Amino acid sequence: MSMKNANKRVNSAICIQRWFRAKLERKRFIEKYYSIIKIEHEVQECMNQKSRAASVIQKAVRHFLLRKRQEKFNSRITKLQALWRGYSWRKKHDCTKIKAIRLSLQMVNREIREEDKLYKRTTLALHYLLTYKHLSAILEALKHLEVVTRLSPRCCENMAQSGAISKIFVLIRSCNRSVPCMEVIRYAVQVLLNVAKYEKTTSAVYDVENCIHTLLELLQMYREKPGDKVADKGGSIFTKTCCLLAVLLKTTNRASDVRSSPKVVDRIYSIYKLTARKHKINAERILNNQKKNSSIGIPFIPETPIRTRIVSRLKPDWVLRRDSIEEITNSLQAIQMVMDTLGIPYQ
């Protein structure tokens, strides 16, 4: 009986052990099953993500290649159109005079000398300006500098680095109202204006000591006086100086610095009032003359109203843009542009 009971107990223990082992195996199997399913889902998601990324990259590459082909096609069409326009224009206008001009240009290009190049002219003119003291040599140097600064940005940078700008301001302050000195001042202001129009060298002109006060002295000295032949030459000095002031003060910080000085603002406003009054007198005189002429049969032509111009559109001559404007030649427009740049009201 005891052996029988012991066998029964052993069999019961073995049964329990088998059941427990089966339970553990089933649990491990379920865990592995779910982990495998999870890994499959992650792999599938990763594959889907890679597939979507590949589709996006392929789409972007196709668009890029299509855009490049379209741009190349458009450039070819534009080139063909330009070639056809050039060919048709030359075929239509290739007369004896144009051929003679072309031949003369080719001859000039073949006979060009090294000293006629812009960088050589710049070096020589700067040497004359910084070394010589005779007025004729200085005027000749300023004429060369006016040409090179109008045509080359590199020459403007070389001039800004040479220290010749401060020398030009000293020259302007030392001149009087004689006709030779007015010619020197006119070319000097034009050179400074050419350098100031180039954004990289504008600060080189503005940073010269007493720059604004020197230009205001020029405005005060060379106000336009209608009917005076000497002052007519100073009229160009007045308008060029106004353009130079407007270009130098077109940034907000510089305009605010100048506007913070009441004396400068009052001086500019007084120059504006004198210029506006003289312009009004001239306009009334011209109007009366036109009315008299219209009474005897000459048609009356009304005067075009004055509009101020935007300073940001005053670009160097080598910038070929349609919105670029030329320098202002009317004295009232010029001083109005300075006041608009500083934000000074007219009344």
Image: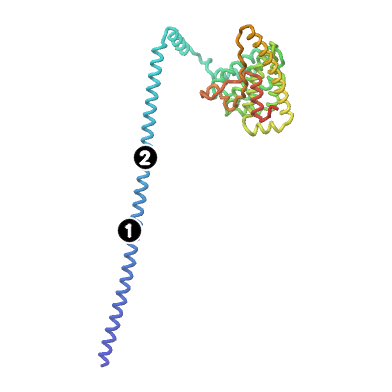
From the image, tell me which residue sits under label 1: 40
**How far from the left and from the top, in percent, is residue 166?**
66, 24
Q: Can you tell which quarter of the image residue 27 is in?
A: bottom left
Q: Nearer the viewer, residue 114 or 206?
A: 206
Q: Quadrant of residue 25?
A: bottom left
- Asked if residue 116 can be seen in this view, the reply is yes
Element under disc 1:
helix
| Disc number placed over residue 61 in the picture, else none | 2
Going from N to C along the chain, the mark reached first, 1 or 2, is: 1
Question: Marks 1 and 2, how far apart in space?
Answer: 31 Å
Q: Are marks 1 and 2 in contact (CB under 8 Å)?
A: no
Q: Residue 90, position in %: x, y?
A: 40, 13
Circle 2: residue type? Val
Q: How many marks?
A: 2
Q: Amino acid at mark 1?
A: Glu
Residue 218 in sight here: no
Residue at the spot 38% in from the left edge and 12% down from the top edge: 91
